[in-house]
Image (cartoon, grey):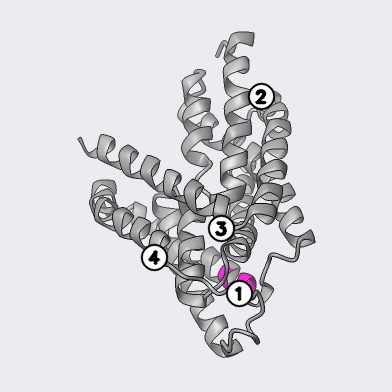
Amino acid sequence: MDITFQDLIILYPLIFLAGFVDSIAGGGGLISLPAYLFVGLPSHNALATNKLSSTIGTIFSTLRYAKGRAIVYLIAVPSVVGSLIGSHIGARLALVLSDNILKLVLAFLIPLAALIVLLANPRKERTLEVENISKTRAVVVSGLIGLTIGTYDGFFGPGTGTFLIILYVSFLSLDHVSASGTAKIVNLASNIGALLTFIVGKKVLYSIGLPAAVFGIAGNWLGSGLALKKGAKIIKPVMLGVLAILFAKILMDLI
């Protein structure tokens, strides 16, 4: 495997961009994984090395959201538990069902998700008490969201963070900043689990992934700061862009 300096000049700015987008609206993997493949990494090494840089970057965006008090832990904790269970179920389903079946379903669901983003009217308050949402309902609904999206993540994956944000806004009335921060900690949990698997399998290329992580950290830090400052004004357009890219990718794969 011969990675040149010119390859790295292409790779690392794309990793920065992926971290920036992912910290705001999820979906950064739609940029970073193809970037690793483009410079010539074998697929397993690309997946593993991408998981290394994205996990480290996500740690920093999660910390910034936590510092900005944009993570609703009453929702985040059940979602993390649900996502860990769901990712296992999804991985098992991947061994049984055709990938094309899920892509066909998503080809119909993604435009619907974009419509939800446009029409959703989240409440400005960030506390569940103010929004009159019972703690029991919050725990149950967030656990189901984590289970559903975790299953999707284990089976297919792209756009996981984006779908989490949409569901938190739509079903739990979180504002976009809180939804993005809460989704980030759920994503971090699933990323760590996958990264440990890749490390045990000795698929991570540290000489490429660790420098890439520096660029990912910068992108995540700047993106999360912008999201905290601008709120829905920046999150909604970026989220719609991610959905458009995901929709185009799925259509291309199907064709």
In the rendered image, the vertical position of residue 82 relative to residue 199, given as above or below: below
Residue that badge 2 annotates: 208
Q: Residues within 10 Å of mark 4 (few under 14, many from 20)?
A: few
Q: Which residues are magenta?
A: 75-79
Q: Amino acid at mark 4?
A: Leu
Query: Residue 76: within the magenta?
Result: yes
Separation of marks 1 and 2 at Cα, in angstroms: 35 Å
Q: Residue 232: which disc?
A: 3
N-terminal-most mark, 3 or 2: 2
Viewer-side residue, 246 vs 116: 116
> Could you tell me if the residues under marks 1 and 2 are in contact, i.e. CB atoms within 8 Å?
no
Q: Residue 75: which disc?
A: 1
Q: Residue 119: which disc?
A: 4
Q: Amino acid at mark 3?
A: Ala
Separation of marks 4 and 3 at Cα, in angstroms: 12 Å
Return the x and y of residue 33 as percentages of the image width and height: 50, 33
Viewer-side residue, 129 vs 202: 129
In the rendered image, the vertical position of residue 124 relative to residue 103, given as above or below: below
N-terminal-most mark, 4 or 1: 1
- Can you tell which quarter of the image residue 68 is in? bottom right
Separation of marks 4 and 1 at Cα, in angstroms: 22 Å
Return the x and y of residue 125 as percentages of the image width and height: 64, 76
Q: Amino acid at mark 1?
A: Ile
